[in-house]
Image (tube, rainbow, N blue to C red):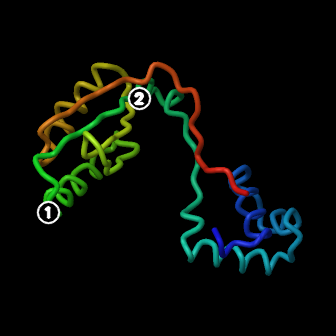
Amino acid sequence: MSDLDTIDIAILKTLQVEGRISNAALAERVGLSASACSRRLDILEKSGVIKGYHARLSHKALDYRMIAIVHISLSGQFAKTLAEFEAAVKLCPNVLVCYLMSGEYDYTLRIAARDLEDYERIHRDWLSALPHVVKINSSFALREIIDRPNVGLG
């Protein structure tokens, strides 16, 4: 963040709200020429500040009405054990997020399922088959209160 100036921040704020804005409109909004804005975007993308541009889909509209929060404990935290688990969990299409954690559990996952029966399938076919898993603890979200795609900027 320390390398970002006020124009970079303005670009990022605008893109968080309007990811499909044209370069010309973005440039006008932040007070740059189109070519200068394009150069700034290129730098922000290449430096990894902008990770990508995505359509934000509604899980509910796509009939994924259940979100499970799953805590997983592994048999150990050796580098090979973690790497094998992480490689395998990346293959599960229902896993939306996977975090390596400190504390009681090794990993926390957010999983989308159509219903309880679908979650049972995911648990049986995917989660239980993940390498080095010794404990799976599942909780189900009752209602989404907030789901921010981005953090606040300056």
Question: Which callout, 2 or 1, points to the residue nearer the camera?
Answer: 1
Percent across and percent down for residue 36 are 79, 80
Percent across and percent down for residue 139 are 33, 25
Percent across and percent down for residue 6 are 79, 68
Could you tell me which residue is drawn at 66 percent across and 76 percent down?
3
State the image quarter where residue 92 is shown.
top left
At label 2, the amino acid type is: Ile
Locate the N terminus and report the quarter of the image it occupies.
Answer: bottom right
| Sequence-earlier tag: 2 or 1 | 2
Q: Viewed as shown, does residue 89 lie left or right of 17?
A: left
The answer to whether 141 is drawn above or below residue 125 in the figure is above
Q: Viewed as shown, does residue 110 lie left or right of 58?
A: left
Q: Nearer the viewer, residue 81 or 113?
A: 81
Q: Viewed as shown, does residue 98 lie left or right of 2?
A: left
Could you tell me which residue is drawn at 58 percent across and 46 percent down?
149
- Residue 80 disc label: 1
Locate the C terminus and report the quarter of the image it occupies.
Answer: bottom right
The answer to whether 118 is drawn above or below residue 25 in the figure is above
The residue tagged 2 is 67
The answer to whether 38 is drawn above or below residue 14 in the figure is below
Could you tell me which residue is drawn at 56 percent across and 76 percent down?
47
Q: How many marks?
A: 2
Q: Describe the element under mark 2 as helix, strand or loop.
A: strand
Q: CA distance from mark 2 to mark 1?
A: 29 Å
Q: Describe the element under mark 1 as helix, strand or loop.
A: helix
- Residue 128 disc label: none
Q: Residues within 10 Å of mark 1 (few under 14, many from 20)?
A: few
State the image quarter where residue 39 is shown.
bottom right
Percent across and percent down for residue 11 are 75, 64
Could you tell me which residue is drawn at 39 percent across and 45 percent down?
97
Q: Are marks 2 and 1 in contact (CB under 8 Å)?
A: no
